[in-house]
């Protein structure tokens, strides 16, 4: 049984003391691929360093995270991404999108960054990995203008209607640690979503699954907790879920 963590920020400072151990532990536990999104151009060299050290295990994405968008850095960041795309091979454009949880005054800039990076993805024939927080309508207004697209709606926390909308658009839903939280609403309807529409992720070092202590660093190895929770929700074996989600990953990142 092999599984892929489709979203882990292994380059972050939380892993500086034991990054190699974390990666090797994941590999030893059959987590055979680690997909690593960037958040701005300062993170890209760190991600490429991991790819070089762990070829065919660590796979780089490139993108400007919406929370990193400002009027001052916007054009420089987007131009840098464009240059990197011409110099190196990435598996995806991500993570990109709109986040209105913390920053609302730069909505126009976020929309512009999202739209521009989708165009990069179309030119390079790459999937996208979408970050969406309190901005579902705004994200879908842009997605509808760019249909069709392949990709993942990362860290989904919405309702059944929104999940169906994502699926009907041809995107997969990223399921991570939130599915294990006691107050999550996703587990009440997730069984109605066909497994062919789901991929696994940790978003480590963030969103550690229950029963880990709140604030404890998340790691790719904890993907197994998420897999076990999904096995309970769907009432099928962890191995079968692993096999189905691996097929889904290949479909997106082919």
Image: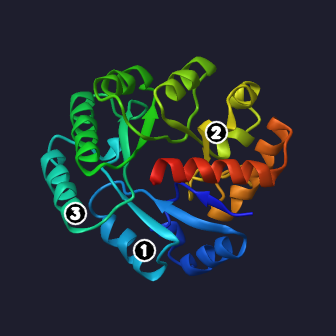
Q: Quadrant of residue 88?
A: bottom left
Residue at 66% over, 58% down: 216
Between marks 1 and 3, how big is the CA–CA gap?
Answer: 15 Å
Q: Which mark is residue 84?
A: 3
Mark 2 or 1: the one toward you: 2
Which of the two residues, 73 or 35, is positioned nearer the viewer here? 35
Residue appearing at x 73%, y 71% in the figure: 29
Residue at 60% across / 59% down in the picture? Answer: 4
Query: Quick check: 169 above or below 37?
Result: above
Q: How many marks?
A: 3
The answer to whether 210 appears left or right of 53 in the picture is: right
Callout 2 secondary element: helix
Specify whether 158 is left or right of 120: right
Residue 111, compared with residue 253, is above or below; it is above
Looking at marks 1 and 3 on the same chain, the residue that comes earlier in the sequence is marked by 1
Residue 130 in the image: state x and y as whole percent. 42, 40
Q: In 3D space, how far apart are the residues under numbered discs 3 and 2 (Cα atoms)?
A: 32 Å
Q: Return the disc, 2 or 1, that comes first in the chain's sequence.
A: 1
The reply to whether dot 2 and dot 1 touch (C-beta < 8 Å) is no
- Helix, strand or loop status at disc 1: helix
Residue 24 makes an appearance in the image: yes
* Quadrant that contains the C terminus: bottom left
- Residue receiving disc 2: 196
């Amino acid at each position: 049984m092999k599984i892929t963590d489709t979203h882990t920020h292994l380059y972050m400072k939380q892993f500086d003391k034991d990054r190699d151990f974390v990666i090797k532990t994941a590999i030893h536990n059959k987590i055979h691929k680690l997909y690593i999104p960037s958040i701005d151009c300062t993170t890209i060299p760190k991600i490429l360093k991991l790819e070089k050290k762990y070829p065919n295990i660590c796979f780089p994405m490139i993108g400007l995270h919406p929370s990193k968008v400002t009027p001052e850095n916007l054009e420089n960041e987007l131009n840098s991404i464009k240059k990197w795309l011409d110099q190196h091979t990435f598996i995806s454009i991500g993570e990109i999108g709109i986040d209105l949880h913390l920053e609302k005054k730069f909505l126009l800039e976020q929309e512009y960054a999202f739209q521009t990076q989708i165009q990069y993805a179309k030119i390079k024939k790459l999937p996208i990995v979408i970050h969406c927080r309190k901005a579902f309508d705004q994200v879908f207004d842009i997605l509808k203008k760019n249909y069709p697209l392949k990709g993942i709606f990362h860290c989904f926390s919405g309702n059944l209607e929104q999940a169906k909308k994502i699926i009907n658009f041809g995107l997969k839903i990223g399921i991570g640690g939130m599915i294990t939280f006691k107050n999550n609403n996703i587990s009440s309807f997730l069984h109605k979503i066909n497994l062919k529409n789901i991929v696994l992720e940790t978003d480590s070092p963030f969103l550690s699954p229950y029963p880990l202590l709140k604030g404890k660093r998340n790691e790719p190895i904890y993907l197994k907790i998420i897999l076990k929770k999904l096995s309970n929700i769907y009432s099928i074996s962890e191995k079968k879920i692993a096999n189905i989600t691996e097929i889904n990953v290949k479909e997106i990142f082919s």
